[in-house]
Image (cartoon, rainbow, N blue to C red):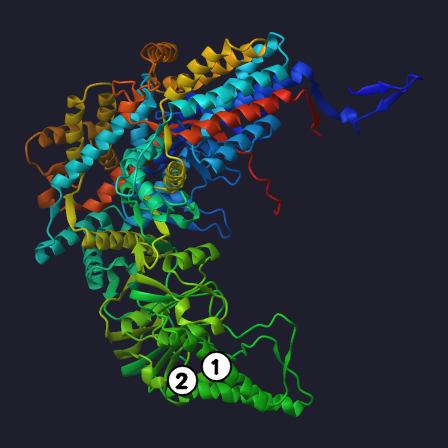
């Protein structure tokens, strides 16, 4: 315990209530941390690659999630251990930044930790290991750049993009129809992409799911799908050439923010008030009508009276549309969101070629399709599937695919998958290691070994003999000097990933290595863990 | 060590084979639970709710049974979910889908025990499912062109669906009822316009389809009980006191006399409203909200039938049936569309008085009045009829039809078997397993009927190896029969949905190699 003594031999208390705190320090702390990190990596290891398995997670509320996505698994696992939480963060930041490779990054970090443990046992100082890792990661990232290839695509030739998305999707449960989904993802991204600025705003892609039907029925809609129906059951279900008024004000009499009271003390006042009230409703509807709107979309609800008036004036309306959806509709239709009736002008209306209501299944499920919009920048991917978990998992997988497509548009460099990039880096790092004098050489070499872990895990998950396969591929890479040799997961018969069309994005891979190294460095630097003991 | 405590205290984690075993067992337990309800001789279950009153439900409907269960096993939840989706999507086959998924997992477990990797099994299942679906596609018949045949197809499907339910005694009666109701919809799948009213008393046979519309409400006192050539205004408006909707308004008076004045004004306002309504030239007024005594009296004076507090669905349906619109403001009488019907009268069913609208303009909606001995019987009858209606409405849209009685399963099994023989590699074991699972369904149907399933299935299989056959299990006689002649049919859409979602669910459960259960959220004790 942290005790110090003054000159008379009386102890100082340094940490508050220190006798109640558990404390680990020195090598022991590092080892405990490493083993926690490894435990997390071990959970994800079996999910890697096209033949990786799924995890079933039951949330505190009893909901079941079946997933293969590293970030989701870790997020839902609700870990308690501090270091494990760092690993969770790691996969989350990969998810935010790149969107894909969330499993790989954790597995890599786990492998690095395992190697570090061995070095620690040899008595190498953790900071030296961390420095060695840092150098090695720089080497690896540079090497990746070196072996990456530019990848030409255009709006008319989307095949390369689809191929890359397929690589991502092939490890998910949806791989049954990965072609269809990959194509949907690419088309969606291209629809919203700003090719000149090389940027994609993924928020413009709405992913909506509805149980029922089959996965193959998943479709891309150039427009918006809203899970709402018309406010009045007798409003038309189909509007062509719709002019849409997008309102954020309720169809109700105004409510001033300042506190006020209207006193009614005579019958006349009562009557004028009533007329006023009716006029409000009339005016509101009239305003919408005057500017030529043929559909009103409102963020708030409206009164029965207003509802009927709208219906009466043949002005279909949708109420309680969420803010995000409202924004998307505004973007898609080129309309403006209008906060007050007074501001409504015909220029502010959105335009859509077709608005229709569609019902599903045998229950009362209706959705509103807004299609052929003036500005097709916002699209919706509408997922169908056998059950709720399937839809959720498809959503996550599609998100990954969308991210990959976006990354390719930002930076069209790719590396080859199937563990080939890692192996190639491993060879390069190992070769470079010998040039560094000092203890770091060991750390760099260990880094190279850790990189082999990913292809190893891939091979293991596919039921191939891991050591045989990885060493064979590695020697082949060195012999033929091609960085394309990877693990043949699907039994195609060749381990040339270029022929198999297995691609990954360069930035994704680079980010994986950088992030994993960073976290491992952080974990290695910890030499004292103080936790309040369990009460 | 720290690594030992990675997760929160009460969380559990199961890995590899243990996880797989847990999900297999859970899924199979669920499948076994509903297994005995399959088929025309399937048994029912009694469900007692834990809520207040300990309500009892007697049912044969897979989705209803599973919905009421509180399940902890995550894999079992997947199965419950597919049955729910099946119910929402096609309405029937809720038991079959769970049983098939259960059987697929049972076979998968055997394969896993033989050290075949789950991914290989999944690959095999996928191929098999695709092949089975193609087999069904080839064999499905489409009689859309021939209305008479199509109608008889619908009849057969309805009878087949109903034969496994409580209504099986009167299945012809109900099948006809359901077919009539669905054909009135003219292709729309909106079952809302078919209203089902349950009235205890009488026997199931007394149930009938009414072409008009029946509203379970009473007519106000002193108002006409019978109106011919009715003009109906359907409304959703407050008929108590009209609130002032301007925010912040309040009444402040300084003397009692003023209060009376205001009250008079209020009354006057209501009176005006009523007068405006009357000015529409109607003789029947149906409101969704309450009608207070005062306006009711005014309506009675004007000889108008006023019906209050019709629920929302009722209003919508009524508007649909009579072709009127649902009104909330009454300033422009000339442009409001009124509903019409030939005759409104009060009718008695059993003890209760109902309002009957007949001779309505739009023929789409109709009402089915169910009669039965007890509320449990009625509930179950409603569910059964709902199933039949769902299946029929789906069939109207997708008119492909298959034979029933285990025929489609045998057809699929045969094709899948053939595929297994042609496929090299370990996958073929999985494909074979798939075919065995398919055959398990007729086996269970036969078992439930107390027949010698082993004998029957082998006969059936032999029969199916001829080129064209329509052989299935004849539950009544207990032998192999010609399903075409017996008139046992099923909808293609239902069978396809069963096949696909069962495979999907099985695949999903098979892919899992780890189950992590989070610590349950602490619930505050409210007991």
- Viewer-proximal residue, B105 or A281? A281
| Residue A490 appears in view | yes
**Residue at the right extreme?**
A8
Name the residue that disc number 2 marks: B331
Residue A278's disc is 1
- Viewer-proximal residue, B403 or A34? A34
Q: Chain of mark 2?
A: B
Q: How far across and how far down the image is residue B287, in percent?
A: 40, 75
Vertical relation: A375 (above or below) B123: below
Q: Chain of mark 1?
A: A
- Left or right of residue B246, residue B498 in this image: left
Q: Secondary structure at mark 2?
A: loop
Which quadrant holds the N terminus of chain B?
top right
Question: Residue at the spot x=43%, y=27% of the render?
Answer: A509
Q: How far across and how far down the image is residue B201, in percent?
A: 33, 62
| Residue B28 appears in view | no
The reply to whether callout 1 and callout 2 are in contact (CB within 8 Å) is yes
Q: How far across and how far down the image is residue B79, in percent?
A: 36, 38
Query: Rounded to the nearest whole Å, what is the CA distance between mark 1 and mark 2?
Result: 10 Å
Q: Secondary structure at mark 1?
A: helix
Q: How far across and how far down the image is residue B458, in percent?
A: 15, 27
């Amino acid at each position: 315990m942290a005790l110090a003594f003054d000159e008379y031999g009386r102890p100082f208390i340094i940490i508050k209530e220190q006798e109640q705190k558990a404390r680990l320090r020195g090598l022991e702390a590092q080892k405990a941390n490493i083993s926690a990190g490894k435990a997390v990596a071990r959970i994800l290891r079996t999910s890697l690659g096209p033949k990786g398995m799924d995890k079933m997670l039951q949330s505190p509320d009893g909901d079941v999630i079946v997933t293969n996505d590293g970030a989701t698994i870790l997020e839902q696992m609700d870990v308690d251990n501090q270091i494990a939480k760092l690993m969770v963060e790691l996969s989350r930041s990969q998810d935010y930044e790149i969107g894909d490779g969330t499993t790989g990054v954790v597995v890599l970090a786990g492998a690095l930790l395992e190697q570090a443990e061995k070095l620690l046992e040899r008595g190498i100082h953790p900071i030296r290991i961390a420095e060695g890792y840092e150098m090695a990661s720089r080497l690896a990232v540079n090497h990746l750049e070196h072996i990456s290839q530019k990848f030409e695509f255009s709006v008319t030739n989307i095949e390369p993009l689809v191929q890359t998305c397929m690589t991502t999707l092939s490890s998910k449960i949806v791989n049954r129809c990965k072609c269809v989904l990959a194509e949907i993802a690419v088309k969606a991204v291209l629809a919203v992409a700003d090719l000149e600025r090389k940027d994609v705003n993924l928020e413009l892609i709405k992913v909506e799911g509805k149980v029922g039907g089959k996965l193959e029925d998943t479709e891309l809609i150039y427009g918006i799908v809203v899970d709402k129906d018309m406010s009045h059951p007798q409003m038309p279900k189909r509007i062509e050439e719709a002019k849409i008024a997008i309102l954020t004000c309720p169809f109700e009499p105004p409510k001033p923010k300042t506190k006020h009271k209207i006193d009614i003390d005579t019958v006349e006042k009562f009557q004028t008030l009533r007329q006023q009230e009716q006029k409000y409703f009339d005016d509101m509807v009239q305003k919408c009508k005057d500017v030529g709107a043929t559909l009103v979309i409102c963020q708030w609800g409206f009164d029965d009276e207003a509802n009927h008036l709208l219906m009466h004036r043949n002005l279909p309306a949708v109420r309680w549309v969420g803010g995000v959806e409202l924004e998307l509709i505004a973007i898609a239709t080129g309309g403006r969101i209008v906060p007050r009736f007074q501001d409504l002008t015909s220029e502010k209306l959105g335009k859509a070629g077709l608005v229709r209501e569609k019902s599903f299944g045998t229950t009362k499920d209706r959705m509103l399709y807004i299609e052929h919009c003036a500005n097709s920048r916002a699209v919706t991917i509408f997922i169908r599937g056998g059950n709720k978990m399937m839809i959720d998992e498809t959503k996550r997988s599609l998100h990954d695919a969308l991210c990959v497509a976006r990354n390719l548009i930002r930076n069209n460099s790719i590396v080859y998958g199937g563990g080939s990039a890692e192996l190639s880096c491993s060879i390069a790092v190992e070769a470079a290691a010998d040039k560094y004098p000092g203890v770091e050489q060991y750390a760099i070499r260990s880094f190279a070994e850790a990189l082999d872990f990913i292809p190893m895990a891939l091979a293991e998950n596919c039921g191939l003999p891991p050591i045989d396969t990885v060493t064979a591929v590695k020697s082949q890479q060195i012999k033929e000097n091609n960085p394309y040799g990877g693990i043949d997961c699907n039994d195609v018969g060749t381990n040339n990933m270029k022929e198999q069309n297995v691609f990954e994005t360069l930035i994704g891979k680079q980010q994986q290595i950088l992030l994993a190294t960073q976290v491992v460095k952080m974990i290695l630097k910890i030499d004292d863990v103080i936790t309040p003991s369990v009460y | 060590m720290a690594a030992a405590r990675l997760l929160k205290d009460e969380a559990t984690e199961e890995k590899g084979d243990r996880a797989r075993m847990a999900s297999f067992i859970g899924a199979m337990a669920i499948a076994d639970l509903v297994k005995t309800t399959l088929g025309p001789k399937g048994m029912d279950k009694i469900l007692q709710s834990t809520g207040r009153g300990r309500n009892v439900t007697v049912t044969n409907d897979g989705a209803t049974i599973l919905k009421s269960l509180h399940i902890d096993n995550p894999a079992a939840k997947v199965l419950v979910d597919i049955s729910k989706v099946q119910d929402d999507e096609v309405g029937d086959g809720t038991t079959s889908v769970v049983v098939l998924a259960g059987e697929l997992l049972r076979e998968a477990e055997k394969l896993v025990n033989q050290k075949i990797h789950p991914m290989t099994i999944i690959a095999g299942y996928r191929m098999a499912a695709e092949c089975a679906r193609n087999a069904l596609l080839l064999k499905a018949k489409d009689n859309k062109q021939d209305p008479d045949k199509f109608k008889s197809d619908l009849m057969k499907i309805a009878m087949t669906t109903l034969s496994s339910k409580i209504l099986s005694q009167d299945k012809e009666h109900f099948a006809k009822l359901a077919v009539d109701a669905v054909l009135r919809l003219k292709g729309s799948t909106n079952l809302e316009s078919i209203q089902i009213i349950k009235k205890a008393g009488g026997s199931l046979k007394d149930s009938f389809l009414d072409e008009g519309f029946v509203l379970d409400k009473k007519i106000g006192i002193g108002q006409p009980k019978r109106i011919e050539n009715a003009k109906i205004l359907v409304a959703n408006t407050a008929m108590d006191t009209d609130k002032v909707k301007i925010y912040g308004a309040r009444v402040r008076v300084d003397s009692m006399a003023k209060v009376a004045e205001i009250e008079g004004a209020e009354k006057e306002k209501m009176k005006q409203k009523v007068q405006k309504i009357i000015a529409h030239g109607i003789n029947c007024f149906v409101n969704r909200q309450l009608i207070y005594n005062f306006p009711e009296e005014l309506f009675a004076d004007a000889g108008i039938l006023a019906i209050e507090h019709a629920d929302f669905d009722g209003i919508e349906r009524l508007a649909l049936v009579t072709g009127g619109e649902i009104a909330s403001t009454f300033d422009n009488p000339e442009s409001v569309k009124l509903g019409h019907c030939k005759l409104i009268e009060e009718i008695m069913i059993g003890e209760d008085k109902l309002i009957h609208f007949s001779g309505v303009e739009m023929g789409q909606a109709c009402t089915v009045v169910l009669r039965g001995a007890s509320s449990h019987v009625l509930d179950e009858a409603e569910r059964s009829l709902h199933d039949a209606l769902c299946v029929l409405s789906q069939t109207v849209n997708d008119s492909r039809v298959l034979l029933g009685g285990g025929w489609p399963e045998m057809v699929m099994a045969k094709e899948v078997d053939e595929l297994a023989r042609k496929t090299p590699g370990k996958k073929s074991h999985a494909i074979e397993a798939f075919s065995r699972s398919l055959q398990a369904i007729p086996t269970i149907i036969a078992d439930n009927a107390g027949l010698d399933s082993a004998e029957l299935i082998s006969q059936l299989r032999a029969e199916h190896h001829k080129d064209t056959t329509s052989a299935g299990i004849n539950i009544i006689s207990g032998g192999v029969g010609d399903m075409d002649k017996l008139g046992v049919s099923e909808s293609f859409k239902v069978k396809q949905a069963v096949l696909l979602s069962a495979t999907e669910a099985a695949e999903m459960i098979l892919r899992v190699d780890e189950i992590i259960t989070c610590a349950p959220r602490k619930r505050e004790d409210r007991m």
